[in-house]
């Protein structure tokens, strides 16, 4: 199979395009996804190829976009809805939590809502207010939703295609900070990366770094720095938060005996808390140190001048790993 | 039983100042010469202030900026018609109203340059911070209007939003509630025809936005938003109605976004040059200038002097925000709660320790 070097944004676009070619029920809808090709260009070229009936510039209403998608999905379409930024999904929360996440269960399988909610998430791009949010925990706390967060172009395409083919509503979080930061080989044509499978992004034996999305790369960078100190860190890119690959996580942590979880969302009730509890419940006697978390503060995400003081960075990861090693 | 008509409605549009700067004397509000000049000066000032922000952004001294080019008349007219006691609830494209209402101009720069202190206005200024979540502010307009009514203050709440924002549920909820409570609210839509790349025809199948008011039992009117006199008249009437307990009004100000959506956008991707030049001919500043000149109130020499003064003023605003002391990293925490929970006290200390290393 031939391949091209693509950024994450381009890989996301290709996933939709390839799947739309294969499946006429796949629709793309959202604000500025048509003529403009999306504010991040993640839907570029789609309206030209598939027309305005399948690539729909909606009125400016997130609740409307998801409400429409519920109606479309329950009656045979596979909508891929874009929220322009994750911080703007809130008007749609009622539709997502009260309907998309529950339709299958409420009707005992009679109706379902196979749809994808694409959301550029996370900090690091110095934007105005509300453009840096990273609220995977909201979606993980809501039974009935799948949550995927790719960290590289190959996974972005393969996971998005899995999401589109999935029978459920999938929150698909795209790390906008690295949308265009680098390019990697991405195969042409449709392929899938399975949901519920973590990836070992770097092998190591002393400490497991558990991360997803943009933080995976910060962890890889930290792991490199740690190796100079003689600490061998393993980076586990969870990429599928629900379904979660607990087997790979447990295997890695039993091997290293140490775990540091890194996410940019606020610490309190973040997904790191769930992982830490799960690991402690299952691996207590194999742990050589308490599970540690490196997270965003429990504050509003600051405007750009103070943004660097909010986001987890290499320094914070290094000190967490060191204290874990010295425990 | 025959069918009967239970409801009928019409929507008016107001224009006073034509493209050549001539006014309809019958409709002309009582704008004294001093106010006409004040409006003009403010619009010139705002245009310079806005284009400076774009230049700063290109130099990396400003964050994302939403330009107001072409929308100066709406912002100036409403701002000048407001009293100190009125509350302003902006969206994100009304620096012209905010500044007319007393918000220090350098703070607006600071805010968009990424500094939270830029939304900390002086105590006596009745203005909310900009609302970036599109449409959310409409409801606050209804709430502040209700508050003023309950407190029996002779004052109005003025809330702004764009054409795109009328598609959000919040717009309808806000307008509906204000109608039910007869809140002291003036709703101003800056219909600049575009919501980023999406034209108004994709937002609504209705002919006007003003007519949406009918469905909520609220008076609505469309105005030529590039006509500062029509805007002034309509704003005054709506403010007076709100202040005197007559309830809310919806104003649809038809204008045009001559610039990009923000500095992160490139409007040439989705709209025609021809449309832009059509609207350039309707430039609100040009129209007012023609009027002032024909009345003998303004000439080239005055313009030159004033532009020089404005440029100095803009430079002062830049100087004022760029010379603010760097924000304290711990300020991320300090205003999260009325008293800081212990968890945050701990996190704050960790950050300070990190910063001091
Ligand atoms: C809830 C929400 N959704 C999406 C956005 C992204 N966004 C910012 S401005 C904008 C368009 C707004 O259009 P309009 O209301 O017409 O105001 P204008 O920008 O033209 O002044 C969009 C989609 C946002 N800020 N908030
Ligand atoms: Mg608009």
Image (cartoon, coloured by chain):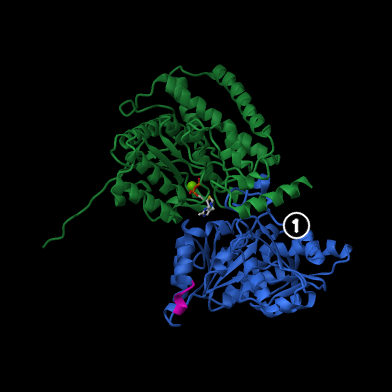
Chain colours: A blue, B green
- Chain to which the residue tagged by mark 1 belongs: A
Q: Is residue A104 magenta?
A: yes
Q: Position of residue A51 (x, y in %)?
A: 53, 66
Q: Nearer the viewer, residue A82 or B257?
A: A82
Q: Position of residue B174 (x, y in %)?
A: 38, 50
Q: Is residue A251 above or below residue A316?
A: below
Q: In the rendered image, which residue does mark 1 sit on?
A: A316
Q: Residue furthest bottom?
A: A109
Q: Position of residue B256 (x, y in %)?
A: 49, 42
- Determine if residue A79 is in view: yes
- Determine if residue B212 is in view: no
Q: Which residues are magenta?
A: A101-105
Q: Nearer the viewer, residue A30 or B101?
A: B101
> At numbered mark 1, what does the secondary structure look like: helix, strand or loop?
helix
Q: Position of residue A185 (x, y in %)?
A: 76, 70
Residue found 86% across the figure and 65% down from its top: A227
């Amino acid at each position: 199979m031939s391949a091209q070097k693509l950024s994450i944004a381009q890989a996301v676009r290709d996933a939709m395009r390839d799947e739309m070619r294969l499946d006429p029920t796949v629709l793309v809808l959202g604000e500025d996804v048509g003529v403009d090709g999306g504010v991040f260009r993640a839907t570029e070229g789609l309206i030209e190829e598939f027309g305005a009936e399948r690539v729909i510039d909606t009125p400016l209403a997130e609740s409307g976009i998801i409400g429409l998608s519920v109606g479309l999905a329950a009656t045979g379409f596979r909508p891929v809805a874009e929220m322009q930024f994750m911080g703007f999904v809130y008007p749609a929360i009622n539709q997502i939590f009260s309907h998309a996440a529950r339709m299958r269960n409420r009707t005992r399988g009679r109706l379902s809502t196979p749809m994808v909610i694409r959301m550029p998430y996370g900090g690091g791009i110095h934007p105005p207010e509300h453009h840096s949010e990273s609220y995977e925990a909201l979606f993980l706390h809501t039974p009935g939703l799948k949550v995927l967060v790719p960290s590289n172009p190959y996974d972005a395409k393969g996971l998005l295609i899995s999401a589109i083919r999935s029978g459920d509503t999938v929150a698909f979080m795209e790390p906008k900070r690295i949308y265009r930061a680098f390019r990697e080989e991405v195969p042409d044509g449709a392929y899938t990366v399975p949901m519920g499978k973590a990836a070992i992004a770097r092998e190591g034996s002393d400490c497991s770094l558990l991360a997803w999305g943009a933080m995976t790369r910060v962890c890889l960078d930290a792991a490199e720095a740690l190796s100079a100190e003689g600490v061998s860190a393993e980076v586990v890119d969870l990429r599928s938060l629900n379904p979660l690959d607990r087997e790979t996580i447990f295997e890695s942590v039993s091997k290293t005996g140490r775990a540091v979880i890194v996410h940019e969302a606020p610490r309190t009730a973040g997904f790191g808390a769930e992982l830490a509890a799960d690991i402690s419940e299952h691996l207590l006697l194999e742990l050589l140190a308490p599970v540690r978390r490196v997270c965003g503060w429990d504050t509003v995400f600051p405007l750009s001048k103070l943004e660097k003081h909010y986001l987890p960075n290499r320094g914070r990861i290094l000190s967490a790993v060191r204290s874990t090693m010295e425990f | 039983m025959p069918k009967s008509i239970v409801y009928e409605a019409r929507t008016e549009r107001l224009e006073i100042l034509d493209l050549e700067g001539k006014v309809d004397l019958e409709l002309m509000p009582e704008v004294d010469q001093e106010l006409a000049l004040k409006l003009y000066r403010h619009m010139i000032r705002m245009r310079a202030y806005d284009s400076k922000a774009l230049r700063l952004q290109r130099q990396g001294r400003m964050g994302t900026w939403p330009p107001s080019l072409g929308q100066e008349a709406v912002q100036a007219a409403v701002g000048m018609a407001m009293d100190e006691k009125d509350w302003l609830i902006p969206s994100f494209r009304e620096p012209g109203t905010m500044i007319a209402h007393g918000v220090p101009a350098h703070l607006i720069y600071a805010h968009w340059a990424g500094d939270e202190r830029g939304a900390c206005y002086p105590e006596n200024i009745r203005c909310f911070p900009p609302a970036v979540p599109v449409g959310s502010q409409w409801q606050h307009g209804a709430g502040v209007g209700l508050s003023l009514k309950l407190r029996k203050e002779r004052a109005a709440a003025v809330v702004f939003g764009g054409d795109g924002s009328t598609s959000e549920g919040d717009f309808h909820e806000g307008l509906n509630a204000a109608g039910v409570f007869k809140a002291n609210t003036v709703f101003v839509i800056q219909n600049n025809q575009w919501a980023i790349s999406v034209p108004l025809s994709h937002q609504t199948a209705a002919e006007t936005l003003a007519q949406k008011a009918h469905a909520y039992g609220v008076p609505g009117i469309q105005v030529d938003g590039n006509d500062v006199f029509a805007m002034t008249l309509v704003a005054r009437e709506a403010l007076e109605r709100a202040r005197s307990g007559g309830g809310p009004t919806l104003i649809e100000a038809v204008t045009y976004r001559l610039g990009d959506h923000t500095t992160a956008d490139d409007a040439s991707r989705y709209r025609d040059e021809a449309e832009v030049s059509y609207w350039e001919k309707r430039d609100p500043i040009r129209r007012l200038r023609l009027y002032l000149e024909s009345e003998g109130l303004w000439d080239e020499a005055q313009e030159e002097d004033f532009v020089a003064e404005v440029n100095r003023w803009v430079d002062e605003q830049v100087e004022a925000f760029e010379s603010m002391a760097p924000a304290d990293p711990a300020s991320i925490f300090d205003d999260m709660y009325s008293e800081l929970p212990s968890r945050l006290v701990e996190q704050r200390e960790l950050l300070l320790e990190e910063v001091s290393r």
